[in-house]
């Protein structure tokens, strides 16, 4: 193409010598084709240009005699040495901007005719188009190569990934299974087109899984579904599938792409753990019942009051255990704990109003607070606001974000006039001494005449777990 | 507990200390105790032969499930109250079960029995 262009230049402008120069990526004008120029000339004048890269539609420059031009003596000397007297600088543009130039060189001073100038512009335009096309083609090929490489890379990644990956079309027909999934089902690559994965499903799971997948295809939406599938060895495995919809460039729904994870062992471990926890809880509570039996015998004839108090405390402990077991001994909600310990809504418990945000307590805090609330409850039943028919109790809690503290306020009102107890019973001791130590917090009991108040403060972090475990 | 007075209550419990305590609680409420039985075999014999108004059953008796005893009692129309640390009871027969959590107080036992026997309790009971 460049050689043909040089032919056209020399022929059209009536000279023997010509050249084509283009800006390189650094913006330096470089010789890309030439005819009849010495190496010295090219190396000396490379980069010499009347235009900056990107100049918009500059006019051509015709120098009829270099001796009359404004060029520096240095440049003139190089041109003279190459036996050149007249030169034409014709800009080559792409989308209106200069990308290079072509040159025509004459040995003698030369007047460029209007016809020659018109021809030069035509040649420059043609050359610009050709270069533009070549450039676009090159870019297209490079993009295609990049795309192929990227596709190959992702294909390899998906193929060898240590998870099961699949693709189906908009009707749910299998398009692709990666190596791990082909191994799982014992399917050869060539059989994928005819393979029906539904046949491997556990009969009891067919309805659920098919329903979920069908709905996802219809909604063109993501789906997560778990089911049992028979593998190549004939064993049922629990697979958790997470699939996402795939859309074409035109926005058309192309089907789903999914990842299957074998969660069989995880599920078994979870079931096992739940079973163990239930068994442990059963044994703990059976032991509490035995302890209760021991107390029953020990206190039998001597002190019914003491026995009852003891049984109540044991109950509070058992209730907290139950709640914690239900949450796998991770945490329990303060509201549930209050509800279970204070029998909110039943009998005298109906006169307690409990209000506060949803706060999670770790096992240690839950057990301590259960005992504390139980003590407050039994005290108020015996002596406080719930010992008559009209008293009430307000139980409120809040989380102080800045101090990172949980504040619980127990406030009695409408009970018989309060007199401060003359001796500290176990209840007060439990509240003021052990609870404060257990929770690294503060417990403040006030025996005001109009009703007992108890403020409990304990450190707790944002998610409701105590900030200092142990 | 006037409604429990003279009622014959079967107790099945393999833990002797707990059995003694339940016995005391029931006697304190005026009931007659049938048993206590500490094995499924003994419990079955009592369940089939004795006159029984209600039963308190431990769910797991020396490693064996209580279901046969519960089935025998229910077949006779005897109200059954399960006492367990498991939190809930699923019977093989699918029948619904009235449950109280271990450990339980005398008041809780009385409420559980009332529920199982369909007795409506009046008045407040706070603790």
Image (cartoon, coloured by chain):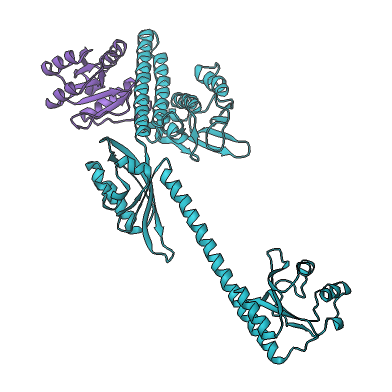
Image location (x, y in percent) of residue A194: 26, 52
Q: In this rendering, is residue A288 above or below B77?
A: above
The residue furthest right is: A73
Name which quarter of the figure residue A61 lies in: bottom right
Can the viewer see residue B111? no
Residue A104 vertical placement versus A301 (above, below): below
On the image, the x and y values in percent for residue A126 come to: 61, 80
* Residue occupying image coordinates x 26% and y 43%: A201
Q: Who's the residue at 59% across and 27% down the image?
A: A441
- Which residue occupies the foreground of this view, A26 or A10? A10
Q: On the picture, is A423 further left or further right than B19?
A: right
Name which residue lies at 49% across and 27% down: A369
Relative depth, front residue between B110 and A206: A206
Which residue corresponds to the image point at 16% horizontal and 25% vertical from the top-left?
B71
Is residue B32 or residue A8 the one in the foreground?
A8
Residue A228 seen in the figure:
yes
From the top left corner, tell me how far across and down residue A226 is, in percent: 33, 43
Q: Which residue occupies the foreground of this view, A382 or A90?
A: A90
Total numbered badges shown on the rendered structure: 0
Q: Quadrant of residue A36?
A: bottom right
Q: Is residue A28 left or right of residue A167?
A: right
Q: Pick the quarter of the image with the N terminus of chain A.
A: bottom right
Which shade of the palette goes to chain A? cyan
Rendered-image quadrant of the C terminus of chain A: top right
Rendered hue of chain B is purple
In the picture provided, is B34 more to the left or to the right than A209? left
């Amino acid at each position: 193409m460049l050689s043909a262009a040089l032919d056209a230049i020399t022929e059209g402008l009536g000279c023997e010598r010509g050249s084509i120069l283009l800006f390189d990526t650094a913006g330096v004008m470089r010789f890309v084709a030439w005819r009849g120029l010495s190496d010295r000339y090219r190396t000396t004048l490379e980069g010499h240009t009347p235009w900056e890269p990107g100049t918009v539609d500059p006019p051509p420059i015709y120098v009829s005699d270099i001796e009359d031009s404004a060029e520096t003596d240095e440049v003139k000397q190089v041109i003279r040495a190459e036996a050149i007297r007249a030169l034409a600088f014709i800009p080559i543009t792409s989308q209106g901007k200069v990308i290079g130039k072509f040159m025509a060189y004459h040995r003698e001073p030369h007047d460029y005719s209007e016809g020659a100038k018109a021809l030069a512009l035509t040649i420059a335009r043609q050359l610009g188009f050709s270069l533009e096309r070549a450039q676009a083609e090159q870019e297209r090929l490079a993009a295609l190569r990049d795309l192929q490489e990227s596709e190959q890379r992702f294909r390899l990644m998906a193929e060898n990934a240590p998870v099961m990956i699949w693709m189906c079309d908009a009707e749910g027909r299998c398009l692709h299974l990666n190596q791990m999934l082909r191994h799982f089902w014992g399917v050869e690559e060539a059989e994928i087109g005819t393979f029906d994965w539904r046949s491997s499903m556990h009969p009891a799971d067919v309805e659920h899984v098919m329903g979920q997948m069908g709905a996802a295809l219809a909604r063109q939406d993501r789906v997560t579904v778990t089911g049992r599938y028979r593998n190549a060895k004939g064993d049922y495995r629990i697979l958790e599938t997470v699939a996402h919809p795939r859309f074409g460039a035109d926005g058309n729904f192309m089907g789903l792409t999914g990842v299957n994870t074998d969660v069989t062992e995880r599920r078994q471990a979870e079931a096992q753990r739940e079973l163990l926890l239930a068994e442990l809880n059963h044994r703990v509570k059976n032991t509490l019942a035995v302890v209760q039996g021991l107390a029953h015998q020990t206190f039998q004839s001597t002190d019914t009051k003491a026995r009852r108090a003891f049984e109540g405390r044991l109950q509070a402990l058992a209730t907290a255990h139950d709640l914690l077991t239900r949450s796998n001994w991770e945490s329990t909600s303060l509201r549930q704990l209050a509800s279970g310990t204070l029998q909110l809504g039943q009998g005298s418990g109906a006169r307690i109003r409990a209000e506060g945000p949803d706060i999670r307590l770790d096992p240690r805090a839950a057990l301590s607070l259960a005992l504390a609330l139980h003590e407050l409850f039994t005290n108020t039943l015996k002596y406080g606001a719930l010992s008559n028919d009209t008293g009430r109790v307000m139980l409120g809690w809040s989380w102080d974000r800045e101090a990172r503290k949980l504040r619980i306020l127990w406030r009695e009102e409408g009970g018989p006039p309060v007199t401060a107890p003359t001796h500290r019973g176990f209840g007060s001791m439990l509240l003021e001494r052990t609870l404060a130590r257990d929770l690294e917090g503060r417990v403040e009991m006030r025996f005001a005449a109009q009703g007992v108040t108890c403020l409990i403060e304990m450190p707790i972090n944002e998610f409701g777990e105590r900030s200092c475990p142990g | 507990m006037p409604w429990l007075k003279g009622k014959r209550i079967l107790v099945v419990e393999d833990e002797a200390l707990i059995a003694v305590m339940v016995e005391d609680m029931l006697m304190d409420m005026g009931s007659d105790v049938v048993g206590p039985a500490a094995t499924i075999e003994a419990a079955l014999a009592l369940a089939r032969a004795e006159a029984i108004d209600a039963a308190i059953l431990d769910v797991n008796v020396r490693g064996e499930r209580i279901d046969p005893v519960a089935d025998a009692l229910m077949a006779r129309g005897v109200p059954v109250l399960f006492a367990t640390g498991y939190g809930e009871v699923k019977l093989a027969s699918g029948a619904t079960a009235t449950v109280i959590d271990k450990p339980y107080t005398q008041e809780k036992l009385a409420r559980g029995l009332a529920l199982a026997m369909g007795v409506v309790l009046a008045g407040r009971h706070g603790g």
